């Protein structure tokens, strides 16, 4: 928001939905509810960054279909380093 991220609220959601005993699709349902609440505040992003979590990508596309989506460069580089270090 205004050049700042929203990691604190997102942390609470991820903490809740990563527990072992959550229902199927709980993460995506909670993300949808959270993003819709953010959208009701009038926040309409033009672009978004994420790691390659498909439920997050699907949710972003559902709530803000007009926004451009990109993968985070840091996550891309980390994935490349991990793959290259496997020496396959």
Image: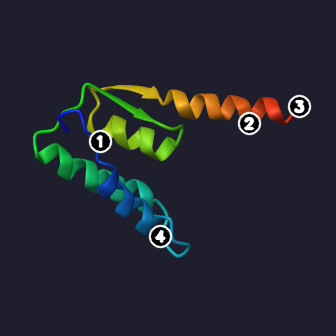
Callout in the foreground (3, 4):
3
Name, please, the residue furthest toward the bottom.
21
Comparing labels 4 and 2, the label whose residue is closer to the camera: 2
Farthest residue, direction right: 88
Q: Earlier in the sequence, mark 3 or mark 2?
A: 2
Name the residue carrying label 2. Answer: 82
Residue density around tag 1, few if under 14, some if 14–19, many if 20 or more, within 10 Å: few
What is the spatial separation of the Cα atoms under label 3 and label 2, in whole angstroms? Answer: 9 Å
Q: Which residue is found at the position 46% from the left and 59% from the top?
A: 25
The quarter of the image holding the N terminus is top left
Residue 20 spot, x, y in % from top left = 56, 73
Identified at 29% across, 57% down, the residue is: 9
Question: Which image quadrant for residue 70?
Answer: top left
Q: Residues within 10 Å of mark 3 (few under 14, many from 20)?
A: few
Mark 3 and mark 1 lie on one chain; the one further toward the N terminus is 1
Q: Is residue 74 above or below residue 23?
A: above
Q: Along the horizontal axis of the image, is 72 left or right of 4? A: right
Whole-angstrom CA distance, mark 1 to mark 4, is: 28 Å
Tag 4 secondary structure: loop
Residue 83 lies left or right of residue 64; in this view the side is: right
Location of mark 1 (residue): 5
> What x and y, as percent, mark residue 57?
43, 38
Location of the C terminus by quadrant is top right
Percent from the top left, x then y, of residue 27? 43, 58
Q: Measure how far apart labels 3 and 4 are at the Cα level.
A: 37 Å
- Determine crowd level at label 4: few under 14, some 14-19, many 20+ residues with C-alpha closer than 10 A: few
SS at mark 3? loop
Return the x and y of residue 42 as percentages of the image width and height.
Answer: 10, 40
In the picture, the disc for residue 87 is 3
């Amino acid at each position: 928001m205004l050049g700042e991220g929203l990691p604190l609220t997102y942390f609470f959601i991820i903490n809740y939905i990563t527990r072992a005993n959550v229902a199927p699709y709980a993460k995506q349902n909670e993300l949808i509810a959270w993003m819709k609440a953010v959208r009701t505040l009038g926040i309409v992003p033009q672009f978004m960054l994420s790691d390659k979590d498909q439920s997050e990508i699907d949710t972003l596309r559902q709530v803000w279909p007009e926004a451009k989506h990109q993968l985070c460069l840091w996550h891309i580089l980390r994935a490349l380093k991990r793959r290259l270090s496997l020496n396959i």
